[in-house]
Image: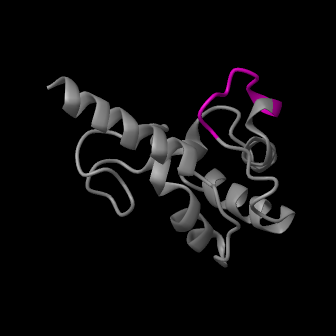
């Protein structure tokens, strides 16, 4: 049982460290979303998500309906999470992984998820 917990923790840490660890080649907002977000935000059984349980990040399926979730906020947060939430620990900064245009496109996509 303890061994299984260590294995699960190892894979969890690898998943967190792997979030956004490469330059994106996806085009279009949905492609960017599918390439960068599900590793950390998909629910069990969703494409890119875990086989059981929940993911590390919050569910983004209706994130655009939350108070204050504007395109500008999303763009700033995606670029550098600590700029909007100084206590952000698991969300990686994408400013060096996505272009400004890609970040803005992804921010628009997320703001429309109502």
Q: Nearer the viewer, residue 55 or 73?
A: 55
Helix, strand or loop for the magenta stretch, by majority = loop
**Residue 84 is one of the magenta-drawn residues:** yes
Instruction: Give the quarter of the figure containing the N terminus.
Output: top left
* Residue 59 part of the magenta-drawn span: no
The residue drawn where x is 82% and y is 65% is 99
Question: Is residue 60 shown above or below 99?
Answer: above
- Residue 66 shows up from this direction: yes
- Asked whether 42 or 110 is in front, the reply is 42
Q: Provide residue 48's location: percent of width, then percent of height.
A: 39, 60
Q: Residue 94's x, y, as percent?
A: 74, 52
| Protein image colouring | one colour
Relative to 27, is 12 on the left or the right?
A: left
Would you identify the image quadrant in which residue 28 lies?
A: bottom right
Question: Which residue is the extreme one toward the front?
Answer: 3
Image position of 9 with respect to 73: above or below: above
Report the side of 73 relative to 66 (left or right). Answer: right
From the viewer's perspective, tell me whether residue 111 is left or right of residue 97. Answer: left
Residue 26 point in image, percent of width and height: 64, 76
What residue lies at 30% left-to-right and 37% top-to-bottom? 8
Q: Residue at left 67%, top 77%?
A: 25
Q: Is residue 61 visible?
A: no
In the figure, is residue 61 to the left or right of 43? right
In the rendered image, the residue lying farthest to the left is 1
Give, as a single range, the part of the protein colored magenta: 83-91
Q: Residue at x 71, y 55 (%)?
A: 107
Quick one: 1 or 113, which is closer to the camera?
1
- Report the number of discs: 0
């Amino acid at each position: 049982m303890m061994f299984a917990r260590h294995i699960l923790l190892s894979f969890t840490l690898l998943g967190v460290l792997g979030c956004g660890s490469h330059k994106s080649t996806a085009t279009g907002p949905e492609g960017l979303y599918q390439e960068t977000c599900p590793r950390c935000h998909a629910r069990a059984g969703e494409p890119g998500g875990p086989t059981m349980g929940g993911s590390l990040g919050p569910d983004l399926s209706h994130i655009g309906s939350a108070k204050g979730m504007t395109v500008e906020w999303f763009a700033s947060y995606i670029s550098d999470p600590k700029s909007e939430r100084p206590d952000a620990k698991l969300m990686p900064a994408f400013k060096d992984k996505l272009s400004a245009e890609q970040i803005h496109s992804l921010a628009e996509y997320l703001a429309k998820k109502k």
